[in-house]
Image (cartoon, rainbow, N blue to C red):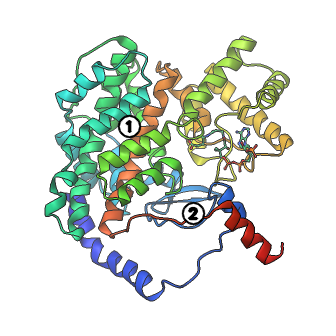
Amino acid sequence: MILHEKISAQLPAWRERIKSLAKEHAEVKVDDVTVGQIVGGMRNIKSLLSDVSFVDPSEGIRLRGMSIPEVLQALPRARGGKMPLVGALYYLLMIGEVPSNEEAQSVEDEWAQRATVPDYVYKMLKSMPKETHPMTLFSQAVLALQNESVFAARYHEMKKDQYWEAALEDSLDLTAKLPIVAAYIYRMKYFGENAKPKYNPKLDYGANFAKMMKVSDRKGYTELARLYFILHSDHESGNVSAHTMHLVGSALSDPYLSFSAALNGLAGPLHGLANQECLGWLIEVKDKFGGVPSREDLYKFAWDTLNGGHVIPGYGHAVLRVPDPRFTAQMEFAKKRFPGDELVRLADLVFDVVPQVLKEQGKAKNPAPNVDAISGALQYYYGVRDFDFYTVLFGIGRALGVTANYVWARALGQPIERPKSLTTKMLEEVVAQRGV
Ligand code: CMX
């Protein structure tokens, strides 16, 4: 398998680099930790290692060193489409190089071979109460699939330097199954259907997802699915979903256990659920004003949201200090294809007004839009209008980045995570000793 071959070839050099850092330079200081960071959610403490992606606060995400426009430009495209193959992105995340068409296609072929979901998963999903949140169903399905884990089955017979191979098997199996599980949840929950979605090996990952979702403009939605999964794949390792995957995986919990945990973090309203929240907020504006409001009305509505004690979803970021390039890429997609759409025009007006409101309020360190500020509007345009499903889509994309990180974490023998906690009294004593 191509990913296996390429990672095997790179591994000796990577292991040497990590060994040298751990053995010869372990005492070198990278940063100091402040009291503010400890009481403030560990913000910006440099304490995780990932070569898959990096977020520059003033520029945004780089996936294996490439910006979003570079990724969209350089990766091999799906036949007849303008967007790259999702398999090409997975190759880039795993291997760190832009694949050839054949290499990208070989990842797509791996997925096609693995794209089956056991019956017990469907049965479990069907047995859940109708009102169960789709993220709960999605996470449960991943947990149920843990039964298939190669990593768990082989754990006792593997040596530590073989863990990554089983992790790679699981990662390919898991990512192959996620679009099927997600499409099944969608059709079951909102349309009362029970047919098992069929993955067509002649189509790529994005096209299969569009087909299984049964949206009416399949061609347009195929392109959106490809873009969406690529943009949501990775955002360095400190965000809640990526960090959760990393933390749980560090206990050698297999990729299914770790990813189910990551999904539970993604389901929080301050993280992935913000896409659902954001579309809800846009619709509220649209309903209240009977369409796109005036600048003044929107300005007042945004202030009312803040004064009501709520955040404005889709705005702000823990690391970024500029508009999120993932927002920009989606806005460009929408403006090219359906510029007159009411929600897109509204999202554009919000982009004009909300940063100003947040600046005036003076709390948010970053008043600019993040990835969630527009993603729901695009889904809505294509008829996927059940907002609570949106975070599931984020989850499919996020799996690509966090499993690539998982494979490399095992390949490089990253140890169990165990930061140290202090008591409040200890912190106060540190402050008193410093005399500040
Ligand atoms: N609306 C209102 N207030 C906001 C805000 C927003 N969009 N963004 C930040 N703030 C507030 C914070 O709540 C915080 O207030 P308190 O001091 O009262 O607690 C203050 O500004 C400072 O926060 P910050 O340091 O700028 O931001 P954080 O790193 O603490 O939080 C984030 C980052 C994303 C959770 C926050 O900006 C937020 O809640 N945004 C809205 C939800 C959202 O869009 N989340 C999705 C993020 C992307 C993703 O993970 O999917």
Left or right: residue 374 versus residue 76 is right
Q: Is residue 117 left or right of residue 135?
A: left
**Circle 1 Cα neighbour tier, 10 Å, few/some/many (<14 / 14–19 / ≥20):** some
Residue hosting label 1: 81
Determine the residue positioned at 56% across, 41% down: 271
- Residue 421 disc label: 2
Left or right: where does residue 376 sit relative to residue 309?
left
Q: Mark number for residue 63?
A: none
Q: Secondary structure at mark 1?
A: loop
Q: Residue at x 31, y 53 (%)?
A: 253
**Helix, strand or loop at disc 2?**
loop
The image shows residue 95, relative to residue 208, as above or below, that is: below
Question: In the figure, 257 relative to 293: above or below?
Answer: below
> Ligand 1: does it lie within 8 Å of the C-beta at label 1?
no
Q: How many neighbours does mark 2 have within 10 angstroms: few (below 14), some (14-19), or many (20 or more)? A: few
Image coords of residue 386 (percent x, y): 49, 19
Residue 9, by quadrant, is bottom left
Tell me the amino acid under the disc marked 1: Gly
Query: Percent from the top left, x then y, of residue 255?
Result: 31, 50
